[in-house]
Image: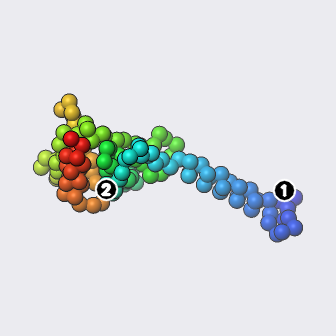
């Protein structure tokens, strides 16, 4: 077997190649992780999970952060080479927050609805945590903005 020789330490060139490929894969995977940068003076008030989208393999869940200025959600890790999901809403753009309509509660069990300026709405489906806790925390953060 001339292609793969054993070195003096007992490792074949195939083992070294596999280790190198594993290192490259881990470096690529780690580089694809996204985390938002907080602004100066921004503090995290509440953290939890949000359902970003549904795929063939089930829901893709990512972190949801409420700060004193923004509500931020992002994809924790990327499984394919696509643009990572990231979103934010400034609390100054949020007029109100509620648990949604009856249909929202039936279709998306743990959803909250943000009423944004200009008559727009944004629905977030929570992955874990109490919906009432999130609604109360967002209302309190909005009140502290004014």
In x, y percent, where is residue 7?
85, 64
Residue 97, position as x, y percentages in the image: 18, 46
At horizontal 84% and vertical 65% (from top left) the residue drawn is 6
Q: Is residue 70 visible?
A: yes
Q: Which residue is mark 2?
A: 46
Left or right of 54? Residue 29 is right
Identify the residue at image location x=23%, y=54%: 137
Secondary structure at numbered mark 2: strand
Mark 1, other Cα within 10 Å: few <14 / some 14–19 / many ≥20:
few
Which residue, as the protein is rendered here, is positioned at the far left? 102
Where residue 32 appears, as percent x and y from the top left, is 53, 47
Report the label total: 2
From the viewer's perspective, is 145 left or right of 54?
left
Looking at the image, is 108 positioned above or below residue 115? below
Give whichever of 35, 78 is nearer the camera: 35
Q: Give the number of the disc on residue 57.
A: none
The colour style of the image is: rainbow
92 vs 135: above or below:
above
Dot 2, how many residues are within 10 Å of its Cα: few (below 14), some (14-19), or many (20+)? some
Q: Is residue 118 above or below residue 95?
A: above
Is residue 131 visible to the viewer in this orientation of the structure? no
**Which sits earlier in the primary sequence, circle 1 or circle 2?**
1
Instruction: Kindly identify the residue that appears in the image at 22 percent across and 47 percent down.
Output: 144
Helix, strand or loop for disc 1: loop
Quadrant of the image containing the C terminus = top left
Q: CA distance from mark 1 to mark 2?
A: 57 Å
x then y, percent, for residue 94: 23, 40
Which residue occupies 22% across, 58% down?
Answer: 133
Q: Which residue is mark 1?
A: 3
112 relative position to 58: left or right = left
């Amino acid at each position: 077997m001339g292609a793969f020789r054993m070195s003096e330490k007992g490792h074949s060139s195939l083992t070294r190649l596999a280790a190198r490929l594993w290192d490259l894969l881990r470096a690529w995977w780690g580089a694809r992780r996204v985390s938002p940068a907080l602004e100066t003076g921004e503090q995290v008030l509440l953290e939890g999970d949000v359902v970003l989208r549904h795929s063939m393999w089930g829901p893709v869940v990512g972190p949801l952060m409420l700060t004193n200025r923004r509500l931020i959600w992002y994809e924790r890790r990327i499984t394919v080479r696509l643009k990572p999901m990231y979103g934010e809403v400034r609390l100054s753009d949020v007029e109100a927050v509620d648990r949604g309509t009856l249909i929202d509660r039936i279709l998306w069990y743990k959803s909250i609805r943000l009423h944004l300026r200009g008559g727009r709405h944004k629905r977030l489906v929570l992955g874990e945590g109490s919906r009432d806790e999130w609604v109360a925390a967002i209302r309190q953060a909005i009140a502290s903005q004014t």
